Amino acid sequence: MHSDAFDRYHHGHSPIHSLDPRVKVLVTLAFIISNALLPDGAWIAFALAWIFILIANVFSQLGVGFTFRRSFIALPFALAAITVLFSIPGEPVTSFRFLMWNFTVTDAGLLRFVSIVIRSWLSVQMAILLVAVTEFPKIVHALNHLRVPTIITVIISFLYRYLFVLADEVLRLLRARQARSAATAGVSAGGSVAWRARIAGHMAGQLFLRSYERSDRIYNAMLSRGYKGELMTIHPHHFHASDWQIAAASFLSLILMQIAGRL
Amino acid sequence: MHYSPAPLHIPDGFLSFVVSFVCWVITAATLSIAISRTNKSLGEKQVPLMGIMAAFIFAAQMINFPVAGGTSGHLLGGALAAIVLGPWAAMLVMTAVIAVQALLFQDGGLLVMGANILNMGLLTAALGYGLYRSVVKGSYTTKLTVAGVAAWLSVMAGALATSLQLWLSGTSNLQTVVLAMLGVHSVIGIGEALITVAALGFVLRTRPDLLGEGSPSAGGGRGWIITGVLISLVVVLLSPFASTNPDGLERVAGDLGFLNTGQSAPYEALPDYTLPILGSTSLSTILAGVVGALVVLALAYIAGRSMQKKS
């Protein structure tokens, strides 16, 4: 497997790509916090937030609809919020019968449900944009600068570095299982569900041992290259004037959204 | 790539700012203890090990097995990580896994990451390790049985915590979300238990030294047993209570000032929340929880025994 099989980074030279990763991480976080703070039914603020995302999309040269096309990943979770449609007291909008229960959708419930889904949908778009315009190691480096404990960022770096190596290992295990479980179309092969779960468990155990032994080799290899307990980078981050300007403009827009949401 | 989002990862927007913030504070406090403990007990060699183990948990979640009708089960890994790595290291490993899932795949949000880490990393590791630690000197069958129960309960603990956070945020109705989340995860948890037991049995047979005396697996203090049993008790006692008698919890939350969005039940399936067969006392709901836990214990014991015969 190629090392960037999991990567969501889109190579480019746009103004957003070249922004300091710390600014990008902070603006993304501030945007998501701002969404969480907007009251229900703040339609103008929601619209402004979406325009903010569209502008960021344009400046990142990925196309206006880039984040929109990928933004449906969090939608299945909307199921968790569906009960508010019926459970918040308010004026009935519509009611229907399902099996033995009567459901009545209230206006207050509808307002709350739509607001929750919009907040989530806006937030996930910003997160999608962040990983699309920032190489993952740079995000981790930025987190380190933003006082996330070193041990956590180091573990994340290792996870990212060896994820595809172990994913290859998993593919080999899955291929081996498939080769040994003869199946004909339409006929379920390979015993009961419990048996299949146990085989999957054995594979997880096997993967654990292979990973454990690999970590020994990795440590020795790192020692031989001068590892002293922390990871180094040859790309120090420097704030430029443009970083300050974009950060200031972004935070100003977020404040405007908060004001618009409360008018 | 085979990356399947799990239903426990809360996206941004579904928890209120206050609930997200409180969860972040709890998570950050716990992680800071975990960091100081691991820094004390682990050498620099353990850092690459924890990194590879994080990648292992991530990769192990890709090993799926067909269940029925096109669905498949896979590992979540919190309890297994805690049993093989020790509780503090497992918490850091699970934190890294959840952070990468959120940052790279948008599976789970950023502001709500504190809640996700708490539900899927901290609770699962504390419960999983605590129960396992109580039988660390026990026989092969006992260990596997308890590991299976711990894995199942850890999934249920995560599901219950997720439900409560959704309810406190005013996103879901308490009774519905608890019933739905626990219902789905009682099945997912069985897959988790089976895989955890099998994986652990495999490691115990092939490399018992990794889990024996002096390993991180035996290193945690006795306080873990109490923590694990306490969390299990909360899960076993609170789940049936929240699903059959939500008024009580809502009153407590209201008194504490958590809840400001008044929500009534979306339908009248259980008028006044009485189950005719069990009566309406909280004793009957607690009994239901205990019976459920005993059934899982028996199932896990049988699974553990059958593993032993094969070896």
Image (cartoon, coloured by chain):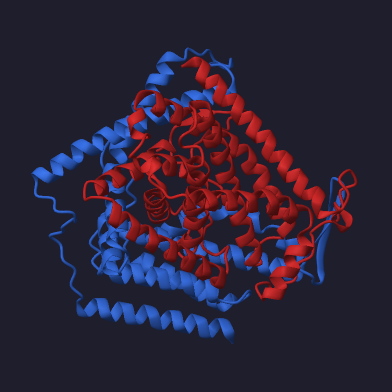
Quarter of the image for residue B69 reads top right
Side (left or right) of B152 relative to A68: right
Residue B139: image location, x then y, percent: 49, 28
Side (left or right) of A108 relative to A220: right
- Indicate whether A178 appears above or below B68: above
Chain B colour as displayed: red
Side (left or right) of A159 relative to B278: left
Residue A97: image location, x then y, percent: 85, 51
Asked whether B124 or A27 is in front, the reply is B124
Residue B43: image location, x then y, percent: 23, 50
- Indicate whether B217 appears above or below B21: above
Residue A85: image location, x then y, percent: 73, 62
Q: Residue furthest right?
A: B276
Residue in the image at 42% along x and 42% along y: B81
Q: How many marks?
A: 0
Residue in the image at 54% along x and 51% along y: B226
Kindly indicate which chain is depicted in blue in the rendered structure: A
Asked whether B57 or B134 is in front, the reply is B134
Residue in the image at 46% along x and 17% along y: B311
Q: Is residue B69 visible?
A: no
Asked whether A53 or B81 is in front, the reply is B81
Q: Is residue A28 visible?
A: yes
Viewport quadrant of the N terminus of chain B: top left
- Indicate whether B16 appears above or below A2: below
